[in-house]
Amino acid sequence: MLTRHRRSLSLVQRGILAVGCGITAVRDPYRYDCVAYATEATTLPSQLEQVKKRILSTDEGRRLLDAKPIINTNTVDFEHLKSLAPSTLGHEYQSMLERQNISPDTRVPVKYVEDEEAAYVMLRYRQIHDFLHLLLDAPTNFEGESAVKAFEFSQTGFAVPFLGATAAPFYRLNSAKWKRHQKRLATLMKDNTYLHYLSVFYEERWDQDIDQLRKEIGIPQIFQ
Amino acid sequence: MIRSVACRVTRSARRISVSPIVAEKSTHFGEKTVKVEEKQGLVNTVFNNVADSYDVMNDVMSFGIHRCWKDSFVRDLAPRPGTKMLDMAGGTGDISFKALQYAQKKYGKSKANFNITVSDINKEMLRVGEKRAHERDDVDESCLTFQVSFILATFMSRVQHADAHKLPFEDESFDYYTIAFGIRNCTDIDKVLDEAYRVLKPGGRFMCLEFSPNVCPAIKPFYDFYSYQVIPPMGQVVAGDWDSYQYLVESIRKFPDQERFKMMIEGAGFEAVNYQNYTFGVAAVHDGFKL
């Protein structure tokens, strides 16, 4: 998932990737690769460095960056997750994947972030997107996705989730829904001094009560 | 018989001085050095990946100019009625479609009697070619409905999966051998030229359209910038594949220049070999005759 050969981009290449992938992603939201690579092209190394620092500020985060775990059908024991008590992280995660018929294997590899640790941070960001759907209880429709993007932006500062949370709904939603979304944005984008969602070693917390985890991270309750 | 032996001897004599690639065990794959046995597989992977977006990317990369090159190429080829053509590395069928249109327009659908075999080592490219031919089936169907007894312009009578280094065709079975934007991907160019010579009839014509590494110095900086800064990211955007287009761009620079390629063609036994540059040397057409 972290390809061994990653390229660093020149300014021109970055621009073309950002604009080209950006336009393609808007016209065809099923081009997940374009969403991913537009993010890689528009994210500055300093932003990834900042997220990395937040992760390294806790013991758990340091363990996470040491281990660099990857979530896919080979690394996660879904049978074990099924056996856990309901309302645990593991059980809820597994049933969400089943309910929505999605797989953790569909994320594209990181190709355009050269530094290995920064590339891992980008990969982790991509992989934890599904967890956010679970923690926020956000549906996979347009409004749910925008809400997840808003939270991601508040925690990372990346440009693509910002656009996904603001510009996309502005153009797509009717005025009533847009007003409701704006209220959500105000909550989601507030500065968060709780545990950073990317510094959480989710794989160590499968049996944790999910509401307790939500409190630790400071997840706003907007869809419940 | 004596003539063909003499030809082969002269060819090998000429060969030694012009192509050191045959002697090496490793070869180039874009900027990388790989074992000879590996190159074909790697090239295959590239074209498997790009097959579906190939035509779109060609338009994007060349701003549609590749169509002009191919039109010019076919006009130069000027296929005559009653002939057989082998379109090698013909993949998605561009040259074949244009050659057929040329023959039909010039000689009329009923009299063209022009037979084309489209051949490629890559099944994915051929699949796309077959699909396009099917979509353009109206051309053939109207031919076919005319009369069976007339001589028809048959097309795609055989879509053959073939390796240019070792063709499954008999000696002296074609009047024309064309290869457009394919030869630079071949591992052993001399072998490909030899095979081309073998399958052509006496009087037959070899024509090759290819990017050349020798671009006019005035535009080279812009050309290089465009090749490395624009094409690979566009490959990611359009075809979801940066690496394959990086390879394509690098492989152009590894190809022999116009003069050297001309000598290689002569080394295979072709005569009256000429070349012509297109678009400031970005591409070139080489042609020769088997006399």
Image (cartoon, coloured by chain):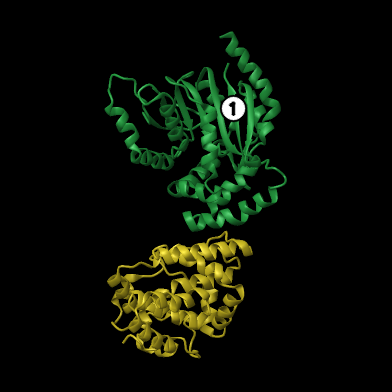
Vertical relation: A41 (above or below) B25: below
Q: Residue A132 appears at what percent x and percent y?
A: 40, 79
In this view, the residue in front, B143 or B93, is: B143
Q: Please state if B5 lies on the left or on the right of B139 as rendered.
A: right
Considering the numbered disc 1 on the image, is that residue within a helix, a strand or a loop? strand
Number of numbered labels in the structure image: 1
- Compared to residue B175, the image places residue B184 above or below, namely below
Q: Is residue A28 visible?
A: yes
Q: Which tint was used for chain B?
A: green
Q: Nearer the viewer, residue B228 or A112?
A: B228
Chain that is yellow in the image? A
**Percent coordinates x, y for residue B279 in the rendering:** 62, 41
Amino acid on which disc 1 is placed? Asp
In this picture, residue A126 sits left or right of residue A53: left
Mark 1: few, some, or many residues within 10 Å (few <14, many ≥20)?
A: many
Residue A208 in sight in this render:
no
- The residue drawn where x is 53% and y is 68% is A40
Name the residue rendered at 68%, 22% in the picture: B14
Q: State whether residue B245 is above or below residue A83.
A: above
| Depicted A63 relative to depicted B108: above or below | below
Residue drawn at point x = 54 percent, y = 62 percent: A17
Question: What residue is at 65 percent from the left and 49 percent from the top?
Answer: B223
In the picture of the structure, the residue carrying the numbered disc 1 is B287
Residue, far top: B2
